[in-house]
Image (tube, rainbow, N blue to C red):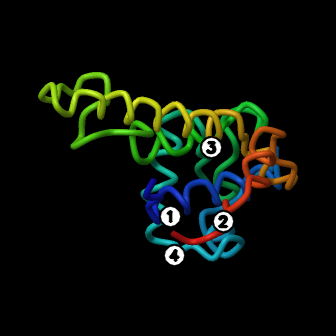
Amino acid sequence: MHVTAKADYAIRAVVELALHEGQVLTRSRLATGQGIPDKFLETILTELTRNGLLIARRGVRGGYLLGRPADSISVADVLRAVDGPLAGVRGERPEDITYPDSSSALREVWIAVRASLRAVLETTTVADIAAQTLPAGVLSLLAEPGVWERR
């Protein structure tokens, strides 16, 4: 899986808001708090707001706050808001792909990849990351032999 800078920054911005849940934070404060380029963050915050993950407040005391509780916002929610579906093949959903008979099992591989991504990204919330307490299923994956090795 390739995580775009946009997706990484989006998750970090939402985590920063989770760390200050209930408070309105300016774009500048979010950018500074997470080391994100301010202008790039502007577009990301707009997309997160449009998807209901954030609420934008205008005015002198304006800024952003979470659109719902941090424990109800999954990493998958944030990724989908800024990058679209979790797993696509040439811009299509895996279940919509057809292959020649000799490669037909590849569709099932892509669907299994999506299922494994969902198992981590849909069960991990922004609150989990902010509290540094990952779900047991994620922790068990991190304990698997060889998981930290580059390949």
Residue 114: give x, y in percent of width and height: 47, 35
At x 59%, y 45%, the residue is 56
Q: Earlier in the sequence, mark 3 or mark 1?
A: 1
Q: CA distance from mark 2 to mark 3?
A: 18 Å
Q: Are marks 3 and 1 in contact (CB under 8 Å)?
A: no
Which residue is farthest front? 102
Quarter-of-image position of residue 149: bottom right
At label 1, which amino acid type do we have? Leu
Q: Nearer the viewer, residue 118 or 29?
A: 118
The residue at 56%/43% (across/down) is 78
Q: Which mark is residue 41?
A: 1
Pointer 4: residues within 10 angstroms few (<14), some, or many (20+)? Answer: few
Can residue 55 be seen at all in this image of the molecule? no
* Residues at marks 1 and 4 touching, judged by CB atoms closer than 8 Å: yes
Alpha carbon distance from label 2 to label 1: 8 Å
- Circle number at residue 30: 2
**Which secondary structure, mark 3?**
helix
- For the residues labelled 3 and 1, the Cα–Cα distance comes to 17 Å
Please state the horizontal and vertical placement of residue 118, each as a whole percent of the image: 57, 34
Q: Which mark, residue 75?
A: 3
User: As shown in the figure, which amino acid type bears the numbered disc 3?
Assistant: Val
Earlier in the chain: of badge 2 and badge 1, it is: 2
Alpha carbon separation for disc pair 1 and 4:
6 Å
